[in-house]
Image (cartoon, rainbow, N blue to C red):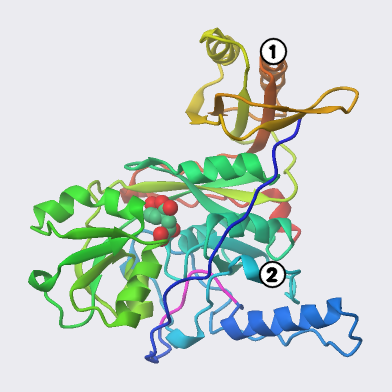
Amino acid sequence: METASASASASASPWARPAQIRPRSARPPCASPFARADWQTACAAILATNSNSPSAAPPPRVNGGYHSNAKPALADHASLDLDLVPVSNLPRPLSITDLSPAPMHGNQLRVAYQGVPGAYSEAAAAKAYPSCDAIPCDQFEVAFQAVELWIADRAVLPVENSLGGSIHRNYDLLLRHRLHIVGEVQLPVHHCLLALPGVRKELLTRVISHPQALAQCELTLNAMGLNVAREAFDDTAGAAEHVAAAGLRDTAAIASARAADLYGLQILADGIQDDSGNVTRFVMLAREPIIPRTDRPFKTSIVFAHDREGTSVLFKVLSAFAFRDISLTKIESRPHRHRPIRLVDDANVGTAKHFEYMFYIDFQASMAEVRAQNALSEIQEFTSFLRVLGSYPMDMTPWDTASASTISNDITDDSSRSS
Ligand SMILES: O=C(O)C(=O)C[C@]1(C(=O)O)C=C[C@@H](O)C=C1
């Protein structure tokens, strides 16, 4: 069974970098060797190589200002030992045009995330892979493609927030791409209201941020008397960067304390999420699946569709888990009418099929367990399309910020250890 391939459309990041140079006193959670100049040099070198130029040397590996063995970012921003770099040296997000083969990268794991430095996704990448090279991408789709094209080894992408719910775009992309879920990470998300130094709350006419972040802070903003225009941005740190770069004195951004440090903004209010236990779940994606195990708690994610009328198929799927005492941790349905799925039969003949809905289920069992294998072979009998997105170690961090930062939890997928 096959999925349709992705059609990518992306544009470059619309905002410029702030011009000011900041002192080097903050250490980011995850290393990133890719500065804008590196990518341009790398792409130019690759183009030269592709056009059979024997003289094209690999680009020099320049550290974009990021420290490589930095600590993961946790909820407690005050405890971070940050090391600021000149803002002009921060890596810019990858865009579709950068997706040519990878430049030289040494042996560090390269992890793609959506956003710019200071985004929560960068912190999630650092929590999942503590000494990785974090590669910012301007869109989720670009992060998927970065892994598929070997520019990155992993992608870390948000799928669900405890306040805002599912991040549907990534569910759709999981289906359209062939990457495997190899792990998950729960990140406590602690939002700040950021503005240019000297700006007072009363001057604000607009708050900008990622739509999820705006939604997660809606009640608190209202309670603060900030009934001003809200505008969506690609990511929280990108919004902070924009306020700084454009010198906007009437606009605040919702972003992390690290974004305030990176882009020279002041924190007008701290902890403005509507729930102090605000947590976002991210999945770690790789080109190859990991080998499922039974010596620790595992989760398995599947997606399926059926072309029969009525609700009985869903009922049968759920009972296949219930009869085997397998707990579900997530169920999500996505409308899918306009995107045919290519199904391949035993004779390798492909047909395009339209399904009304795709159903995504996460269940608490490893594919190495017989009960999980039996449940799936039963489900396969009454579904027309079934794909295992991944079987991976559960992040056991409780969805509770108070305890999250104190629990040490080995969430790194096995395959990364050999990388
Ligand atoms: O904008 C960011 O900083 C992100 O990492 C994205 C994102 C999301 O997509 O949900 C991640 C965590 C928070 O929930 C808010 C935004």
- State which region is magenta: 26-32
**Residue 414, position as x, y percentages in the image:** 70, 49
- Cβ–Cβ below 8 Å for labels 2 and 1? no
Give ligand 1's quarter of the image: bottom left
Examine the structure image and report whether residue 28 is included in the region drawn in magenta: yes
Mark number displayed over residue 378: 1
Mark number displayed over residue 108: 2
What amino acid type should be assigned to the residue bearing mark 2? Answer: Gln
**Residue 58, position as x, y percentages in the image:** 79, 84
CA–CA distance between discs 2 and 1? 41 Å
Residue at figure coordinates x 68%, y 46% from the top left: 179
Q: Nearer the viewer, residue 121 or 345?
A: 345
Residue found at the far front of this picture: 338
Residue at figure coordinates x 25%, y 70% from the top left: 194
Where is residue 372, by image quadrant?
Answer: top right
Residue at figure coordinates x 53%, y 10% from the top left: 315
